[in-house]
Image: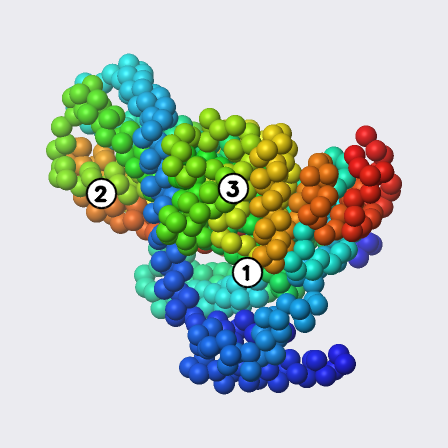
Amino acid sequence: MGFALRSVNLASQKLRSFAPLGRWDTCPYVVRGAIDFNFAFSYLPVLDSSPIIAVTALVKQFGRFAALRGVSAEFNAGRLYTILGDNGAGKTTLLRALAGLAEPTRGRIQILGTTNLRAVCRQLGYMAHPSLLYDEMSGMENLRYFARLYGITDDDTCGATMAAVDLDPGLPRPVSQYSQGMRQRLSLARALLNDPTILLLDEPFSNVDVRSAGAMVSLLAQMRTADKTIFVVTHQASLLEDVADEFIWMEAGQIVRRTPELRPLETK
Amino acid sequence: MKRAFPIFAVLTAVLLSYALYEALVAAPTEQTMGNVQRIFYYHVPSAWTAFLLFFINFVCSVQYLVCRDKVADTIATWVVVVLGIATCVAAFVIRPLPAGIEPSSVATTGLAIIGLYFLIKKYFSGGSTDALAVVTAEVGVVFCTVVLVTGPLWARPVWGIWWTWDVRLTSTLVLWLIYVSYLMLRRFSTSGQTPVLAAALAIFGALDVPLVYFSIWIFRTQHPQPVIGGGGSIDPRMLHVLLINWLAFLCFAVLICRSRYRLEILQREVEEVQALEALHEPRSTR
Amino acid sequence: MNKEATSDVTSGLTSQRMSQSSRAIAGVSRATLAKDLRLEWRSKDAINSMLFFALLVVVVFSFSFDPNAEQSRQIAGGLVWVAFLFAAVVALNQTWARELRNQVLDAYRVSPAPANSLFLAKALGNFIFVAVLEMLMTPLFIMFYKLRPLGPAWQLVPIAALGTWAIVVNGTFFAAMSLRTRSREIMLPLLLFPVSIPALLAMVNATTVILTGELSAKFWIVLLSTYDVVFTIACLLLFGLVLHAE
């Protein structure tokens, strides 16, 4: 079976070189699908069972401190994964490694079929502990600037993203005067600007009031339905109990358990 | 290899003593400067050794930066080959050369650049290239300090001044400053990728030194200053003593670099082992 | 397998990609520069403190070196540029202050925006900032030292521009490098001064030569331009490494 697949791949690659004028990306999807079976398959999410993210024996050490000690896992597309664990378990480090911010000491990360994480950074959205926002600018100005980094020049996308997280796009207040809930929501909006396929969220609900948290959870549920892969690191697992597809437990730099449900006994 | 080191050390000691004897006793006394001139046999070889070590550091830095990326690696190799050949050709084509420089020495330098690059590429890779860079920077700074101390010591009795902003002294001072800042960056850096930052700084330094040399050269043509050391021809017997001293200094530098390199590699191995241990031992819950 | 595929695509799209990427660099640089200038204009705290600092530097120097008009022409070149250098260092230390506050650099690293565009924007912003400082300090120096250039005074403008760019381009690069070190504020001058020596020499000599009217400043301007070109290219090539170093 493997041999058959490999020969099919090889044949499709040879055929790609015949693409008109060498401009593969401008070929209509139908033509591309006919020539490149991989391409065709990637457009059939039902048939595509290859993991969207594959982590192999990932080790991250800071001097003598090992934040990640050999994490191996596969994650499929269109799911919402919740990562739980004590402080210092390596959750943030894992997320940063997936985002391409922390170079692995050993091991391999494959996202969307490539180990070159810079190549797929357009498909990633990252939200961290610090807000990653400019305190002196208003919410809309922040989003406008970060959208520009992704090549998005229209204001409508920024306005729509702000509205999606339940913030007023016309609010002139600088971010330093936002409440914590508003700041977290704006940070999430920044991560959503480029409409990423994969979302990496590090403690999005920390210090956030119940209403804002609820709004964010429903937004995440919507995104998951829209076939996005979402990773949430959180201490408030109960918020995602009904929404998450899988709960991943980390301890001392390793994944110790993966469960489809959050058992009441294990809630921290 | 283990046994070669003590033998080499003994040989170096013998060579150094012989060189010292030659410099202090056997070499002919200079006409105008007298016995003070003998510091020349200490000053000049230190300078050449320091420049060689800094050049090795530069080559290591470049290799460390390009080794990850195949394309950059190929480009760098081609640039080195072209530069080396161009230097050889230029040595015989460009006339007249600046005072005191022989075409053969320029050509040898060109070939040495190519040879050194490929030697280092063959025998060192990745982490060991970086270790070599640290070692050569440290030992180079030591030799450069010797140059900067012996220079004024020589200048004061002979020319009556401690310091002058001539081409060679100023370039050496700038080189020393750049590499001291290099060592400070290495020491103060908290990044996990200190070698990359340090390599970038070494490249900046290497770009800077020719500019310094050139700028002081222009400055001197506009404001003639006293020249320490002077150019021009040298008595063959003095040249002979000078070369013996240089050989002795080179052997000494190789000796020290070898010890320091082994120390550096061992330190890194210990750190790796400790890191691996920390990886596998069960972590205490806080 | 993937490398083959991507090379097929890139070979077909190289020209399109290059023009797109240069547009991307220009667009992001422009946006970043506009943002920095807007924020600076709003808060004005850095510019106010820097302007006052510049004034203090001029006054202190004038107290310390008080020559008569003839001598002042000889040394004013050096004095002025040393004063500019120290003011520039204080300004350069603030380059990344806003980005550090909420770790905004992580957002930049995660985005596809090229590192060069961030560098260009920051360098241009610093250039404008230091140029403003110099424009304040120059009339004060002229006043305190009773300077009157005997050579072609118009040449001072390109010298000032090239010299300021020389300090600023390396300063922005080393400011980013010193983000990853302890004692951040002292590492910047430690790294910057040795590398800037040829530029400093060129600036000082060019200014002195124009003030005293003795010789031509042409060589120094050529040297400064060479320095600027060499180090701008080096900074643009190496900045990506520095930005992505953890």
Give the Cα separation between the discs numbered 2 and 1: 41 Å
Answer yes or no: is residue C38 visible. Answer: yes
Where disc 2 sits, the SS reads helix
Where disc 1 sits, the SS reads loop
Q: Is residue B17 above or below residue A106?
A: above
Give the Cα separation between the discs numbered 2 and 3: 51 Å
Q: Is residue C72 above or below residue A237?
A: above
What mark, if any, has residue A203 been given in the picture? Answer: none
Give the Cα separation between the discs numbered 1 and 3: 28 Å
x and y percentages locating residue B179 in the rendered image: 53, 41
Where disc 3 sits, the SS reads loop
Please state, as top left, top right, bottom left or bottom right, where the N terminus of chain C lies in the image: bottom right
In this picture, residue A242 sits left or right of residue B101: right
Answer yes or no: is residue C243 visible. Answer: no
In this picture, residue C152 sits left or right of residue B18: left
x and y percentages locating residue A121 in the rendered image: 55, 55
**Chain of the residue where label 2 is placed in the rendered structure:** C
Discs 1/3, front: 3
What mark, if any, has residue A119 been given in the picture? Answer: 1
The foreground one among C146 and A87 is A87
Q: Amino acid at mark 1?
A: Ala
x and y percentages locating residue C81 in the rendered image: 30, 31
Q: Residue at x 58, y 74 (%)?
A: A39
Please state, as top left, top right, bottom left or bottom right, where the C terminus of chain C lies in the image: top right
Which residue lies under the disc numbered 2?
Answer: C158
Q: Amino acid at mark 3?
A: Val
What mark, if any, has residue A165 been given in the picture? Answer: 3
